[in-house]
């Protein structure tokens, strides 16, 4: 259960006294999620989402994440809005942790991805990119190509515990990605983790984009590449070109891709598969037994990576 930090009643009362959102009625821990402690907070005025940021979030990044949500919500993106206290601050301290209250969005994330989910996800992603284009704060992507070798080094010696020969297999991919990674494609603020559990739907309509805690500045097309991995593979790990067409089609209704972005998609998708493989591999090997963190399967990403390796152009995705 993702409640690492318990909040005592008097701590909550003192915290809420800084806001103008009524009296607390209940504050229930939310079991899902692994990074932070999350609570559904009901007050006499409404329902809110309270997060206490745990150790994997660098507190120095929080003004970027909260400022970005403010910026996007003000431009009509269906993302949570941070609540500001009477002193104007959205970020404060609760139970010795950095903490913030954000609006509670309606909807549920889709347990089974359908083609009909993919178009709206692409469209929402493109809108996010455009809406963030005048966001002033910057946050480099620590998990882009320059960050992959150190991550690999941290797992190399034990990678065979996950799959025999894994480190050797990844060596060639990593070298190719480092050599060919594009530098001159359109860049801006990206979500960087728009997986199915970060998109809410209500009555078949996209109702929310959440979890901006990997957002950063990077290539816009890389965000599409993340989504090709996250949304277009079936549980049997086969690639679904209909989903890819819907996703990229939805994106291009709002922001058409340049020829160079289109051409770069196979490499970017291979890179995105590498990024999630390496963080999952690291967590797999370094999470102590009994920890509350639910580990995700790195082998799923290896299947994605192998597929993208075999794709020569965007045509290979049915685009
Ligand atoms: N603003 C929000 N409104 C409504 N539900 C939300 C909101 N933010 C998150 N949730 C829901 O709360 C749960 C936990 O959130 P989330 O997944 O962001 O947690 P997390 O600790 O950051 O973990 P992770 O990074 O692993 O996803 C999820 O079920 C998500 O759908
Ligand atoms: N979306 C990530 C988990 C971190 O949010 C993954 O699937 O590995």
Image (cartoon, rainbow, N blue to C red):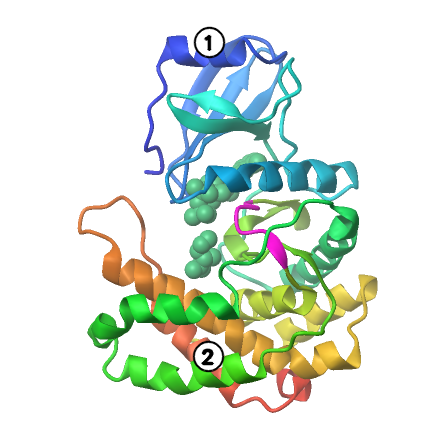
Q: Nearer the viewer, residue 200 or 72?
A: 72
Q: Are marks 2 and 1 in contact (CB under 8 Å)?
A: no
Q: Magenta stretch: residue 214 in it?
A: yes
Residue at 27% in and 44% down: 292
The residue carrying mark 1 has its beta carbon less than 8 Å from ligand 1: no
Which residues lie in the magenta part?
A: 211-217
Q: Which label's residue is closer to the chain start, 2 or 1?
A: 1
Q: For the residues marked 2 and 1, what is the alpha-carbon distance in whole angstroms?
A: 49 Å
Quick one: SS at disc 2? helix
Examine the image and state in which quarter residue 189 appears.
bottom right
Examine the image and state in which quarter residue 284 appears.
bottom left
Q: Nearer the viewer, residue 191 or 197?
A: 191
Q: Against 184, is 125 above or below?
A: above
Pointer 1 local density, CA inside 10 Å: few below 14, some 14–19, many at least 20: few
User: Seen in the image, is 293 located left or right of residue 17?
Assistant: left
How many numbered marks does the figure carry? 2
In x, y percent, where is residue 263?
69, 84
> Looking at the rendered structure, which numbered label has been put on residue 305?
2
List the residue tagged with mark 1: 13
In x, y percent, where is residue 152?
35, 71
Q: Nearer the viewer, residue 140 or 119?
A: 140
Residue at 55% in and 44% down: 108
């Amino acid at each position: 259960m993702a409640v690492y930090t318990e909040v005592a009643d008097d701590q909550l009362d003192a915290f809420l006294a800084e806001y103008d959102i009524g009296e607390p009625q209940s504050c229930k821990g939310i079991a899902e999620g692994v990074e932070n402690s999350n609570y559904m907070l009901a007050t006499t005025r409404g329902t809110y989402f309270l997060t206490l940021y745990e150790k994997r979030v660098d507190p120095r990044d929080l003004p970027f994440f909260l400022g970005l949500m403010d910026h996007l919500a003000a431009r009509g993106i269906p993302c949570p809005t941070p609540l500001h206290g009477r002193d104007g601050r959205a970020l404060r301290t609760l139970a010795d942790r950095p903490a913030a209250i954000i609006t509670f969005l309606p909807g549920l994330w889709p347990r089974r991805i359908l083609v009909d989910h993919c178009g709206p996800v692409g469209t929402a992603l493109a809108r996010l990119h455009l809406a963030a284009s005048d966001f002033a704060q910057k946050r480099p992507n620590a998990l882009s190509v320059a960050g992959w070798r150190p991550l690999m080094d941290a797992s190399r010696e034990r990678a065979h515990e996950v799959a025999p020969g894994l480190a050797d297999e990844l060596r060639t991919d990593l070298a190719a990605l480092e050599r060919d990674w594009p530098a001159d494609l359109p860049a801006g603020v990206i979500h960087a983790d728009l997986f199915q559990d970060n998109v809410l739907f209500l009555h078949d309509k996209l109702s929310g984009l959440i979890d901006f805690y990997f957002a950063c500045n990077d290539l816009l097309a890389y965000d599409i590449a993340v989504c090709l991995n996250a949304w277009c593979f079936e549980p049997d790990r086969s690639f679904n070109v209909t989903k890819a067409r819907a996703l990229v089609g939805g994106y291009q209704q709002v922001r058409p891709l340049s020829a160079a972005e289109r051409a770069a998609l196979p490499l970017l998708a291979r890179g995105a598969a590498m990024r999630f493989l390496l963080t999952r591999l690291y967590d797999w090997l370094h999470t102590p037994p009994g920890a509350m963190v639910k580990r995700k399967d790195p082998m799923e990403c290896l299947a994605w990576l192998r597929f993208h390796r075999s794709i020569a152009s965007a045509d290979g995705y049915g685009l």
